[in-house]
Amino acid sequence: MTSEIDRDERNSAADAATKKVTGFAGLLQSARNSINRNMEPFSEGLHKVVGGSTDSGYESDSEASVTESPRADKTSVNQREPVLRSKLKKLSEIQLKPEQVLIRDKLGFFLGVVNLCLSAYWLGGSPQTFYKYYTAKAVVLYGSRFYLYRSKNWHYYMLEFCYFANILLLLEVWVFPQSPTFHKIVFAQVAGPLTWSIVALRNSLVLHSLDKITSLFMHISPALVCWAWRWYPDPSVVKFDQMSAEQLKAYNTASWWDIGVLSMSSYMIWVVLYYIKVGPFPC
């Protein structure tokens, strides 16, 4: 009697295990069929691009998938792999052909080269007006960046210190051109942390990338403007003949108080404003 009960229990356990395995196999088959159906459009599009046949290479018939043995499936995959690799290589070669390069990249590269040559010529030929060229580029580049970043909800990145320092520079050359103190504060900011950011952030000159060009411009151009403004100020704006002896001395000298304490104070103002806006309790 006991042996019959044990035999019945073993049979019941075996039946339960068989049902679980069958159910798991059904789930695997269903997942496989779903993957095959999702891969068909990609495979057909790939073959259309490279000029191949529209046969996806994947079995979409569930009955054929059921009767196909694992060994035959593995052999089929191994046979298709070299063909797919060859077609992908051909597709890459097509995309790298000159006629496939976007006109936007070509135009961006052309404008980047023109800007590079014009900046060098302008800085050497007319350094006293270089700030005007900087202002025009700042309006275009920062305006386009705000538009692009706003569309991606990235615009809070434009609250970082680099943009704050560029705003200070624009205020110096257009609002406070006669202030020696303001000039020293801005000079310390753009010739110090802003310039070192080129190395720290690994800025690169990629002529066909508007984002990289803007980042490099944001960090290197203010230092060039400050250099030109210090040694070749615009005589129509910075009027030395109207300055007193004390003002001339203040303009031509600098102390640790001016370069260190005052510039750090402006940095702390930005820190407080930034923390209020994007801190744990933004306003």
Image (spheres, rainbow, N blue to C red):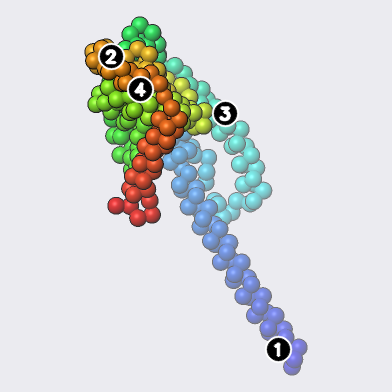
Q: Earlier in the sequence, mark 1 or mark 2?
A: 1
**SS class, disc 1:** helix
Q: Earlier in the sequence, mark 1 or mark 4?
A: 1
106 horizontally vs 204: left or right:
left
Residue at label 2? 240
Coordinates of residue 111 in the picture (x, y in percent): 35, 16
7 horizontally vs 223: left or right:
right
Q: CA distance from mark 3 to mark 2?
A: 72 Å
**SS class, disc 3:** helix
- Give the image quarter of residue 19: bottom right
Q: Residues within 10 Å of mark 4 (few under 14, many from 20)?
A: some
Coordinates of residue 279 in the picture (x, y in percent): 38, 51
Q: CA distance from mark 1 to mark 3?
A: 63 Å
Say which amino acid is labelled 3.
Ser
Residue at label 1? 5
**SS class, disc 2:** helix
Q: Please tell me which residue is depicted at 42% across the width and 35% down the height of the picture.
A: 261
Is any atom of residue 132 visible in this view?
A: no
Q: Please tell me which residue is depicted at 76% across the width and 88% down the height of the picture.
A: 3
Residue at label 4? 250
Q: Residues within 10 Å of mark 3 (few under 14, many from 20)?
A: few
Residue at label 3? 86
Q: CA distance from mark 2 to mark 4?
A: 12 Å
234 horizontally vs 119: left or right:
left
Q: Is residue 230 above or below residue 9?
A: above
Q: CA distance from mark 1 to mark 2?
A: 112 Å
Say which amino acid is labelled 1.
Ile
Q: Earlier in the sequence, mark 2 or mark 4?
A: 2
Say which amino acid is labelled 2.
Phe
Q: Earlier in the sequence, mark 3 or mark 4?
A: 3
Where does the N terminus fall, quadrant-wise?
bottom right
